[in-house]
DNA sequence: CCTGTCACG
DNA sequence: GACGTACGTGACAGGG
């Protein structure tokens, strides 16, 4: 069969697969002989996933995996320094290269490489030929060098981000259409491949020039006309170098191939060959999975006798004596070389504080294997000779100059070939970003723990170290002291700082070894790789962006609140007949329940009166004093938590407020916002909502807010399979009114706000694991009546009860529940008896729903930087179902369009929801207007 | 440091 | 049959 119209060719960039697999996995070795096979294992898993993902209606008719041939390519003849700054492949990866070819053939997928050419050239030639023959092409790679091929039936697919890149995507990245990409690359050059380009010209400028002059040759021939003297000179001076650069980046579409397009036709895998190979590699899980899939029997694998020990026993004891203090360039270079030899390094930064937007770098520690770690002190202060309390500002001796050390570390920290391992890497990334270093790629032990043990325990370093290494880390407290006499880390003497700092990196590396295999065992690798790890750089960027807050607006509100509160306080004291602290529930309770003998008082655990708002609200119908207290409390809350406190969070340098998001804080997968919490800025009361007027855009910009409409109810409808709910959502109905209509037999056109309100409360109750008591309290109706509502609800939507029962049963059996994307939320209390059991079972019912919604918006956020690249728009905040952007005035509509597309399609392609996700958008000169 | 209260989704 | 319950967070003030 010839290749032609209607055919679809997939071209997989094999080398990219290998390197990704290699860095994504710990250094696995084959049990029987110690052959390193980690990259092969990852490669096979990726191929397997690829085959699974591409079995659908859009399946390719032809496919091939293309590899780079070892050795030099024809480009080295053009330019001897081409790719000269690439480090050699890691030692333990080299023997795995031929094995990946074998693996590809075992999957019965065509596999090619040609001496003297790079994979990109073979891919280019095949893509051109397939296009000429009238077929479609998908290139599975994220390599920007391949983007020049896109267009006219050729697309790219970034398998890691699950992102399709078409002409528009290329244009968004390079600012020019695909056919002009080489021109831009020739000008901008590429530091990774060592393509020189034109010095001082980056992608932005290059695109601008190309768009102005049409193409590179025209530009170079008319370079004399360029207005900016610098640019003009650069282009004239480096014309030859730019032409060579173009040859370097230009892919060869016309090379000779020793095989035909036809020969790439997709073939079914042959069970025997594939299983044979996997078994020989001793990949037990994958062998079994493939065998199940192909309906064949997994051969008896050489079973290791050992039981599955959770964490490998540590044979290297912790020994602070072995940690090295790095004080000069030669020593630092040795550690950098060690990192390159391994391909990974654990990194930890020491700073002057916990606030990454303010703290200054004090030192960096590295670890390359268990027990082998160093600390590079950089800005430790000398101890004062007179023994003064604060010491001087002179630097302690024996430290490398900060600039020199960072200059040496930067290439390694940014090298895509070196995996940087950290515990809570967002912190270190943010610190280093302020010194011009963009750390990547990363692994994060905190997130590895969260992905596999969310709900079981905390994920801080101390907890993890004790649990998985049996080692209590050196506490920081004695080093820094506390209270007034506390010092910052740069004042800690080196002999104490080194053991502490180096140990942190050592622990992190050991945790990585201990936790990495567990990801696969717990089947949460995808969760970690698609929902946790890629969020780190996205959040780091958002937090560094911050949001502008108008201090004057807040300050005026604070004053107004203070005045009103003073008035209320006087009234309250008058009504009470005595002066007391209105803010003390204890004292207030004594006034209300002892002195005035009002009913409904309850005492808390401490024996003090409890005075929550709902109790005061009941009393307020009869008495003025509790009514005034409620007003006072609202103002007090707004003032102390928002209008006062927010002002203290305005960063001196940026004039903006920078929250910090905990990725591993909430059990369900939600983020949590701290210092300050920008996820609980008031909105429900009119008075509180005005606080949002203080959140403003920069001049010439607009705040844009996009939020998911009813996302949790939609997910409930999908998960529990409630036909009536699904239909209502598909028809775009008012969901609470539709629920009310169904439950109370009221036609939609006769719906009253009161009936709708009750249905709304029930809908939310269901998400929370409804109880008659809870609903009764929320709606302020008798418990029996509330129970009647619930019974009727279950009758009309029987799928709900089934879902609740099934979820509880699953949790009881497995000890966890799952979201649609595979996130596990552990429910250790589910089998307890006593009141905890009730809590645990409601939490278990809620977790898949809340957690799936959290996963959806995480996916949207991870895709967002690519989606808005090139637009003058920044993502600033996330509030669970809402994303807030700051956008230049002219780009608002375009931004809303792109963001909405990403958000509404965020579940795809992993989960195809049975209901549409709908996103509402708003814009304005404040958050109040935009929301 | 714990508890109560209340802001958000 | 009684008991106690809506899910998930973080910040602040009071009080020991």
Image (cartoon, coloured by chain):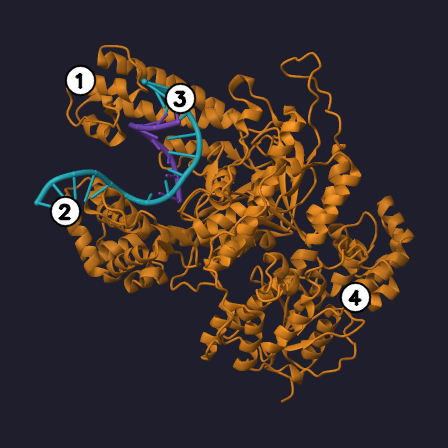
Chain colours: A orange, B purple, C cyan
Distance from Cα at disc 4 to Cα at disc 3:
66 Å
Q: Is residue A636 above or below residue A345?
A: above
> In the image, which is nearer the foreground, mark 4 or mark 3?
4
- Mark 4 neighbour density, 10 Å: few (under 14) some (14–19) many (20 or more): many
Q: How many marks?
A: 4
Nearer-N-terminus badge (2/4): 4
The residue at 40%/18% (across/down) is A562
> Which quadrant does the N terminus of chain A fall into?
bottom right
The residue at 56%/32% (across/down) is A355
Nearer-N-terminus badge (1/4): 4
Q: Please give the label number shown on residue A785.
A: 2
Distance from Cα at disc 2 to Cα at disc 4:
74 Å
Distance from Cα at disc 2 to Cα at disc 1:
33 Å
Q: Is residue A252 above or below residue A634?
A: below
Q: Which residue in the protein does label 4 denote?
A: A250
Displayed quadrant of residue A38: bottom right
């Amino acid at each position: 069969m010839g290749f032609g119209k209607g055919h679809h060719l997939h071209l997989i960039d094999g080398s990219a697969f290998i390197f990704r697999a290699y860095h994504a996995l710990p250094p696995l070795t084959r049990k029987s002989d110690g052959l390193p096979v980690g990259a092969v294992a990852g490669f096979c898993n990726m191929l397997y996933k690829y085959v699974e993902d591409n079995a659908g209606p859009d399946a390719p008719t032809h496919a091939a995996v293309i590899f780079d041939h070892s050795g030099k390519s024809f480009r080295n003849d053009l330019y001897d320094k081409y790719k000269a700054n690439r480090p050699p492949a890691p030692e333990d990866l080299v023997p795995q290269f031929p094995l990946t070819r074998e693996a590809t053939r075992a999957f019965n997928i065509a596999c090619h490489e040609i001496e003297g050419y790079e994979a990109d050239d073979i891919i280019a030639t095949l893509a051109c030929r397939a296009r000429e023959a009238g077929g479609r092409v998908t290139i599975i790679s994220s390599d920007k060098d391949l983007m020049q091929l896109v267009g006219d039936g050729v697309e790219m697919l970034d398998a890691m981000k699950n992102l399709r890149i078409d002409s528009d995507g290329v244009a968004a990245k390079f600012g020019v259409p695909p056919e002009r990409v080489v021109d831009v690359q020739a000008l901008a050059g590429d530091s990774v491949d060592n393509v020189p380009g034109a010095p001082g010209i980056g992608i932005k400028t290059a695109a601008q020039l190309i768009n102005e002059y049409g193409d590179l040759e025209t530009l170079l021939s008319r370079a004399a006309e360029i207005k900016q003297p610098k640019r003009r000179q650069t282009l004239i001076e480096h014309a030859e170098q730019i032409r060579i650069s173009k040859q370097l980046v230009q892919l060869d579409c016309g090379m000779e191939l020793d095989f035909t397009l036809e020969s790439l036709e997709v073939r079914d895998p042959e069970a025997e060959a594939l299983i044979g190979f996997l078994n020989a590699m001793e990949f037990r899980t994958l062998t079994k999975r493939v065998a199940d899939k192909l309906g064949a029997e997994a051969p008896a694998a050489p079973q290791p006798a050992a039981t599955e020990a959770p964490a490998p026993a540590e044979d290297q004891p912790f020994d602070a004596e072995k940690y090295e203090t790095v004080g000069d360039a030669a020593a630092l270079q040795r550690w950098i070389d060690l990192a390159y030899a391994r391909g990974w390094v654990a990194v930890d930064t020491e700073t002057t504080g916990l606030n990454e937007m303010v703290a200054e770098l004090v030192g960096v520690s590295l670890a390359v294997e268990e027990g082998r770690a160093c600390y590079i002190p950089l800005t430790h202060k000398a101890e004062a000779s007179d023994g003064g309390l604060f010491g001087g500002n002179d630097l302690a001796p024996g430290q490398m100059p900060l600039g020199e050390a960072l200059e040496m570390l930067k290439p390694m920290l940014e090298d895509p070939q070196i995996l940087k391992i950290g515990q809570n890497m967002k912190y270190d990334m943010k610190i280093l970003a302020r010194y011009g270093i963009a750390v990547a790629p990363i692994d994060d032990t905190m997130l590895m723990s969260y992905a596999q043990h969310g709900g079981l325990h905390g994920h801080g370093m101390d907890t993890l170290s004790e649990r998985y290494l049996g080692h209590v880390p050196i506490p920081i407290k004695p080093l820094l002291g506390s209270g007034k006499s506390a010092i910052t880390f740069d004042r800690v003497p080196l002999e104490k700082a080194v053991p502490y700092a180096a140990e942190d990196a050592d622990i992190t590396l050991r945790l990585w070894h201990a936790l990495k295999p567990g990801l696969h065992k717990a089947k949460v690798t995808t969760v970690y790789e698609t929902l946790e790890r890629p969020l780190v750089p996205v959040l780091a960027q958002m937090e560094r962006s911050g949001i502008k807050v108008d201090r004057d607006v807040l300050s005026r509100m604070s004053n107004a609140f203070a005045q009103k509160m003073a008035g209320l306080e006087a009234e309250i004291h008058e009504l009470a007949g005595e002066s007391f602290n209105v803010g003390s529930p204890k004292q207030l309770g004594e006034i209300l329940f002892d002195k005035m003998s009002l009913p409904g008082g309850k005492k808390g655990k401490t024996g003090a009166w409890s005075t929550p708002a709902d109790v005061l609200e009941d009393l307020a119908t009869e008495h003025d004093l509790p009514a005034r207290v409620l007003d006072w409390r609202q103002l007090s809350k707004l003032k102390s938590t928002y209008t006062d406190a927010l002002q203290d969070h305005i960063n001196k340098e940026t004039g903006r407020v920078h929250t910090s998001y905990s990725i591993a804080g909430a059990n369900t997968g939600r983020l949590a916002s701290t210092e300050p919490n920008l996820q609980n800025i008031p909105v429900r009361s009119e008075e509180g909502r005005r606080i949002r007027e203080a959140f403003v855009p920069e001049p010439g910009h607009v705040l844009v807010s996009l939020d998911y409409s009813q996302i949790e109810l939609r997910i409930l409808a999908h998960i529990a399979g409630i036909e009536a709910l699904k239909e209502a959502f598909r028809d775009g109905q008012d969901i609470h009114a539709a629920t009310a209509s169904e439950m109370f037999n009221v036609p939609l056109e006769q719906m009253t706000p009161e009936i709708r309100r009750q249905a709304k409360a029930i809908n939310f109750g269901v998400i929370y694991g409804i109880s008659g008591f809870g609903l009764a309290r929320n709606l302020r109706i008798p418990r029996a009546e509330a129970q009647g509502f619930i019974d009727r609800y279950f009758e009309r939507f029987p799928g709900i009860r089934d879902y609740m029962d099934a979820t509880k049963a699953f949790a009881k059996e497995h000890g966890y529940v799952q979201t649609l994307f595979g996130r596990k939320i552990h429910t250790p209390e589910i089998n307890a008896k006593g009141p905890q059991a009730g809590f645990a079972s409601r939490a278990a019912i809620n977790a898949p729903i809340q957690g799936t919604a959290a996963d959806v918006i995480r996916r949207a956020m991870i895709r967002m930087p690519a989606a808005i690249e090139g637009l003058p728009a920044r993502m600033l905040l996330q509030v669970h179902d809402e994303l807030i952007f700051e956008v230049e005035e002219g780009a608002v509509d375009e931004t809303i369009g792109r963001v909405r597309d990403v958000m509404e399609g965020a579940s795809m392609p992993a989960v195809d929801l049975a209901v549409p996700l709908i996103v509402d958008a708003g814009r304005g000169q404040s958050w109040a207007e935009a929301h």
